[in-house]
Amino acid sequence: MSQDFNPPSPDLKTFLDRVENVYLNDPDFKAAFDAAIKGVQPRPEDIKDKVWQDWTDATVEDLCTFFDAWYEWGWDQGVHDGLDYIEKFSWITYRNDAGMDFVTSGPGRDMLADFTHLQGLQMDDPASKALVDQWIKELGPKKMADFEPGDWSTFNKFFIRELAPGARPIDARLDPGVVVAPTDCVINMIVDDLTDSTQLPVKTVTMNVRQLLDGSDYASCFTPSGPGSPGGTAVSCILLPDTYHRYHAPVGGVVVEARDDIGGLYYGMKDFPALLDKGNVGYGYDYSMFDDFRRGYVVFRTPYVDHEGKPDGEGHVALIPVGLNSIGSVQFHDKFRNITKESTPVPVEKGEEIGYFQYGGSLNILLFEPGRFPALQLLMGQRIGVLEETERSDFLFRNFRRTTPRRVPPVS
């Protein structure tokens, strides 16, 4: 982080003073902000007032006023309001390369990292207990029955609440051929023929596995072994704001490599609303951008079995927790931190807890070797979804876009 925003701001006033001072005294910050504002796009026709912010001709004073309102709003945001200000801010980057540059590099990036840290302090403040009480009331006794009562004296403690015993039984715990969901999520297949080529379009997305795994040698497990060979499969598991935010091992075996300290971006989506498009969360989204977002990864070595249940060798599965927007925390438990190829592999059971996200948007990306995870497959009687309340559906699945995605190709 640049000296202008280091050490992190202890309070909102310090942060706002820093933003104004940097704009006045750092010509690079001023030029980047002014270019971002110059590139702001007109309001799309289908955007509701609730999530629209007009950044046309905005000044640094307008930016500070927005941050002030965002911070104060944080004390009383409801369960169904958690993404409003994130989307309002995202109109700076919507189809705006200069806006992307501003929030993903230099002092602009550091400014957002500082504000994210400040939001984390806010959610650790005992005053956030009032927000906890509001969420408990809005979630209702049916959903809250899934969780073990604990020390919920701050919102962050509540956000990483633990499941009650028996609330999420692990399916086929002893069958190595069954993969389980790593967390409560909306699951979406991204692509079933991964490539190692940088920014290569594959179907509707671009996916660079080596970047996502930060150059790990294990990336080659999920990409073609040679010309004409198939690639592996990537699956997105997107966490919704009001659900469980701990993540677990999707398979059993051993962990052969793990890190939880990669990347530092939290904002910077060309079309943030398209991430939650039309109820098909994440479909067709450009996942190559996540190589710079705050994230970790875990590589599992897991046994394979054939159709008769007999051993069929072993292979690898990767879990990549990605922190988005207000997320400043991708936390692994000590057991799974900093495992290298030179370390002794760490045993892991299917369903064992790996870590958690603190407040913000987040997702897990699962990677599978070629030919090993061809489709999502369910058995009769297993859960495939929920009949939702219309308010929650409108907020989480239909609030942002009712038309086709406005995704544009990534900038090379």
Image: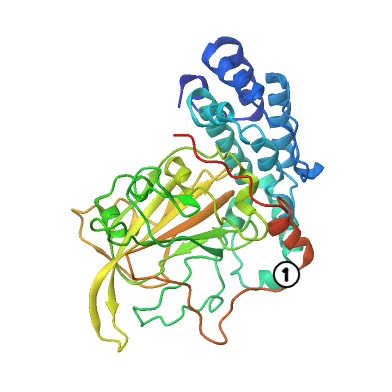
On-image quarter of the C terminus: top left
In this picture, residue 305 sits left or right of residue 136: left
Question: Is 215 rendered above or below residue 3?
Answer: below
Place residue 117 in its image quadrant: top right
Left or right: where 379 falls relative to 298:
right
Q: How many marks?
A: 1
Whether residue 192 sits left or right of residue 273 in the image: it is left
**Amino acid at dot 1:** Glu
Q: Residue at x 61, y 44 (%)?
A: 272
* Residue found at the far right of this picture: 49
Q: Position of residue 92 (x, y in %)?
A: 65, 31
Residue projecting furthest to the front: 228
Residue 43 versus residue 64 in the image, above or below: below
Q: Say which residue appears at 75% left-offset and 36% top-offset.
A: 43
Left or right of residue 311: residue 271: right
Q: Quadrant of the N terminus?
A: top left
Going 33% across and 45% down the picture, which residue do you hit? 214
Residue 176 x %, y %? 34, 78
Counting from the top left corner in percent of width and height, residue 148 is at 59, 69
* Residue 305, image quadrant: bottom left
Image position of 124 with respect to 221: above or below: above
- Estimate the x, y position of residue 283 in percent, counting from the top left: 56, 57
Of residues 154 and 186, the one drawn nearer to the viewer in this rendering: 186
Assess disc 1: are there few (<14), some (14-19) or many (≥20) residues with their C-alpha within 10 Å of its C-alpha: few
| Element carrying mark 1 | loop
- Residue at mark 1: 388
- Whether residue 5 appears in this view of the structure is yes
Q: Residue, x 23% and y 82% (percent of image)? A: 311
304 and 406: which is toward the camera: 406
- Res. 26 visible in picture: no
